[in-house]
Image: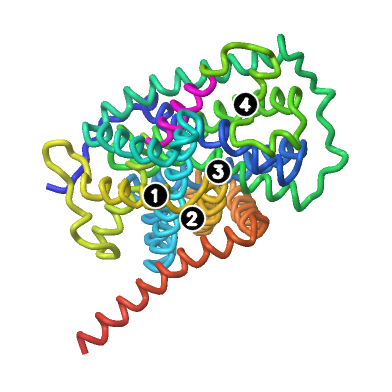
Amino acid sequence: MNDLQRTLTFRDAVVIGAGSMMGAGVFTAWAPAATAAGDGLLIGLAIAAVVAFCNATSSAQLAAIYPESGGTYVYGRRQLGAGWGHAAGWGFVVGKTASCAAMALAVGAYVAPDSARIVSLATVALVTAVNIGGLSRTVAVTRGLLAVSLGSLTVVVVLGWTKANASAGEIELSETSLTGVLQSAGFLFFAFAGYARVATLGEEVVEPERTIPRAIPAALGGVLLVYAIVAITLLGVIPSREVGGVDAPLRLVVEAADSSLGPLVQVGASIAALGVLLNLIPGVSRTMLAMARNRELPDWLAHVDTKRALPIRAELSVALSVMVLVLLLDVRDAIAVSGVAVLLYYAITNVAALTLTPVQRRFPKPLALAGLVGCVVLIVALPTGALFGGGCVVLAGIVARWLTLAFHARSLT
């Protein structure tokens, strides 16, 4: 039997969505964003949030119509055609696998900088073991990790506005360029990319037609509020040029406050990244499951373990791929490559949403158009190296599918 079970409630879905986002950007994406835009990263954050919201509305209404595992891989196939679906699915797999690598590397950087890659590999193995234990356990652990992460961020904000004397007057936008702001938005979009994690669990959510459209915006709105508070605190204490020069900028706030709570921030950052990994690895595996069911990935990956109701083979394949990227990339490169592939995925999401009929539509059509334009602009704004590298990997997957189909068609004639 290859069916999944509907066990996730609205609260579970919000927790998973918030847990997939919290930590992805709030502990790692400020540095490249500050390098690109300086204090203008605040504008970049707003742009990234707007694009994410537009994408979320498209994902939500499509997920309500097609409550199946696979996200935009399914939506693209149903609304646009198999080729579009494959491009979206492969973009998701590439982008989110890179995201997982970034999170694993972040854990290593915070816990043991001198042995970062070894710790990162061990982290991926640990998270995979938890996920294989069952989705209900994943939800419970995610709830705990999210609470600890929020507690750590609260410490940073309180220290910044009390002992470190943060001041919004220290934030200066006069030297910000449009190009830099857009590039920072591309980096910071990485911070929101987990909001549609719920959509990839379409076969495991109770009453998906009602739950998914409510859970995605709820998770996104709550996380945006947290990000805005943290960003203002960070720039109110630390000059943006210093933020861009380190991989752990929130630790600078604690140091500026001359506080002994630095280890708490390190632990919080690590736990936040663990929460993201805990949810993203299953998300990628569900897309691989859907693609394998349609014979666009090896049939072997379509197996669902009947005892745990999990696609264990797909999850193990994702974990192995993440480990390989951990050995090849650093945090900033992983974020950039992820941004290119994931923005492509959501561009296709918006194209699919534009084809919905008035009866199917739950949000105004201009939101999908704005999301599409935003995704394209942010892709182009990302560093050329990431655009080339991520684009080549995505293109390679599309070409491989085309060649496979052509081979099978010729063998039948």
Q: Horizontal placement of 350 versus 296: left or right?
A: right
Query: In the displayed structure, would residue 348 be above or below residue 1?
Result: below
Residue in front for this viewpoint, 357 or 289: 289
Q: Is residue 244 covered in magenta? A: no
Give the residue number, with chain letter if any, for mark 3: 190
Which of the 4 image quadrants contains residue 202?
top left
Give the residue number, with chain letter if any, for mark 4: 250
What's the magenta region? 265-277
Give the residue number, with chain letter if any, for mark 2: 345
Amino acid at circle 3: Phe
Amino acid at circle 1: Gly
Q: Please tell me whether mark 3 sits on a helix, a strand or a loop.
A: helix
Q: Position of residue 372 (x, y in %)?
A: 59, 55
Mark 4 is surrounded, within 10 Å at the Cα level, by few (under 14), some (14 to 19) or many (20 or more) other residues, namely: many
Q: CA–CA distance between discs 3 and 1?
A: 18 Å
Amino acid at circle 2: Tyr
Q: Is residue 343 visible?
A: yes
Q: Earlier in the sequence, mark 3 or mark 1?
A: 1
Give the residue number, with chain letter if any, for mark 1: 71
Q: CA–CA distance between discs 2 and 1?
A: 10 Å
Task: Give the label, 3 or 1, closer to the camera.
Answer: 3
Q: Position of residue 8 (x, y in %)?
A: 31, 30
Q: Horizontal placement of 180 versus 22: left or right?
A: right
Task: Give the label, 3 or 2, closer to the camera.
Answer: 3
